[in-house]
Amino acid sequence: MGLSNSIIRQNYIIPADDFSLAGEASSSVKKMLNQLGVPPKTVKRVSIAMYEAEINAVIHAGGGTADVAIDKEKVLITINDEGPGIPDVELAMKEGFSTAPDSVREMGFGAGMGLPNIKRYADKLDIKTEVGKGTRVQITVLL
Amino acid sequence: MNEYFHSVTLDEEKCKGCTNCIKRCPTEAIRVRKGKARIIAERCIDCGECIRVCPYRAKKAITDPLEIIKNYKYKVAIPAPTIYGQFRAARSTNHLLTAFKLLGFDHVYEVAKAAEIVSNATRELMKKNNFRKPLISSACPAVVRLIQVRFPSLIDNILKLESPMELAARIVKDELVKNENMRIEDIGVFFITPCAAKVTSIKAPYESEKSCVDGAISIKDIYLKLLNALGEVKEEAEEQLVKSGFEGIRWASSGGESLALGTDNFLAVDGIHNVISILEELENDKLKDVDFIETLACQGGCLGGALTVENLYVAKTRIKKFIDMAKKNSVEDNSANIYEYDLLWTRNVEHKPIMQLDDDFEVAMQKLETLRTISEDLPGLDCGACGAPNCKALAEDIVRGNANETDCVFKLREKVRALTIQMMEIESMMPPVLDKDDKNSDKTDKKDKY
């Protein structure tokens, strides 16, 4: 049927400052992966990594977009935002580092686990960021 | 008993084929076909939500009738802790337990007592600190089955210890065989159940080959008999049957199991839809700071079970009396240490992938693509008239080959409309030999010329 290079694509808008909607995109991806019969442990890795990236975009960048592409080999998630950018990516990758405001931390978010957690669950993590312009986080999880 | 035995079943005659149950089912396990609700066996977790919401009482739980106890020489009742909240007329635990004897039971052993032993074992397990945090309680079999079908990544978090019901049955049988020299096949142990999920656990257990319990009788089926018996048992005739303490009795309510663990670092959630929200948070790694999660499918915990009689909130007040009594008269009891049972499950629960569209990844991809196209095309009103709980579920059913697009009344109307327009168009066309209308157009003129 010539399906070997078929790709499923899905785009989401990550709303700004709305915690009640944050996580909807990763939930929807989780459902698709379950429908495809991806092993539970892999589904969990994808959904946690994507969830963290989504929350990051909500907390730090006033929302953004998430583009998901699934093919036979991998899930590729690209989260784009036009937020403040990350001045020091290396520092942001450290466990416990956080620039989230107190109000956000009180809700249990922004404990500085975001990027390291994404890295832990992703097979590949690529961050392109420019201060004042925005950030692109690209997560790859192999299937 | 086969793998897909379910206690929850349909009363064909009473079912009107409405949308109440299909919309509330947490695993989207019900479809209406030919005017009747059909339960999809692989998806049903026996939570009993449909029994609760059916306005026509068409959903029921298969339980055993009281007469079943006659099949055994020696009959033992093991009532769920929920029983203590059911009767205003019960003076004390002993009063209530003695009443069971008037129903034909030879012996009564409280599941609440076994619950305390399970609590001890859980505490020990948590002390060792080599478990996957947080532990998810396995007290509610509907939740364990929910995890199997919807949250497979959490299977490793399940507390894999025998349930108080199973342990109670084991203890009773062992004691009778050892102390009374009875033959095990002569002993019949019957769980007095507040819910359908436990019945399924007895008939088709997931944690072992075979249950130690010989039958399940619902609280509502013996309620009246027990109520009458309570009236007959005089205070001086009460037997000393109570063994449980307040911690065991408290298991009947949401939070009871957790409170017995001696840690504040727990979360107790009840009501199947609330349980789903918490399990979703857990899947997103959001509750790593919690040690223990108590998850009960029924609102309020087992006191809110679909096979109970007393209103949940009334029952909560009633059971308080028994908890207080147990606190006051706490029997010095070391039996928890006497029983050296290995409570670990003898087999693990497996993932039951109900969501998967196809075994072949590429075919599944194609089906998913089709599903999304169909989904976008459906009205999104989730009316349920097609027999599926919502438009997405219908799209899934279509892709799986279990439904048609025209099952959607709106789609059907569109089709009828398109067909009508087409028919009107065809109707206005006339074969030339029959077209005798003079007033008609230049076509006629042309023909006249020939």
Image (spheres, coloured by chain):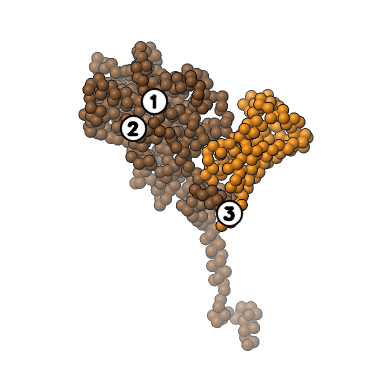
Chain colours: A orange, B brown
SS assignment at label 1 = loop
Do the dots labelled 3 and 2 sit on one chain?
no
Q: Residue at x 24, y 17 (%)?
A: B237
Residue A139 placement, left or right of B94: right
Q: Is residue A29 above or below residue A115?
A: below
Q: Position of residue B260 (x, y in %)?
A: 44, 19
Please rate how many residues cluster around mark 1, counting C-alpha atoms within 10 Å: few if below 14, some from 14 to 19, many from 20. some
Comparing B34 with B277, the one in front is B277
First of labels 2, 1 by sequence position = 2
Disc 2/disc 1 C-alpha distance (Å): 13 Å
Residue named by callout 3: A3
Q: Is residue B436 visible?
A: yes
Disc 3/disc 2 C-alpha distance (Å): 48 Å
- Which label sits on residue B343? 1
Residue named by callout 2: B211
Q: Residue at x 50, y 45 (%)?
A: B356
Q: Residue at x 69, y 30 (%)?
A: A93
Q: Position of residue B94 (x, y in %)?
A: 30, 18
Comparing A58 with B166, the one in front is B166
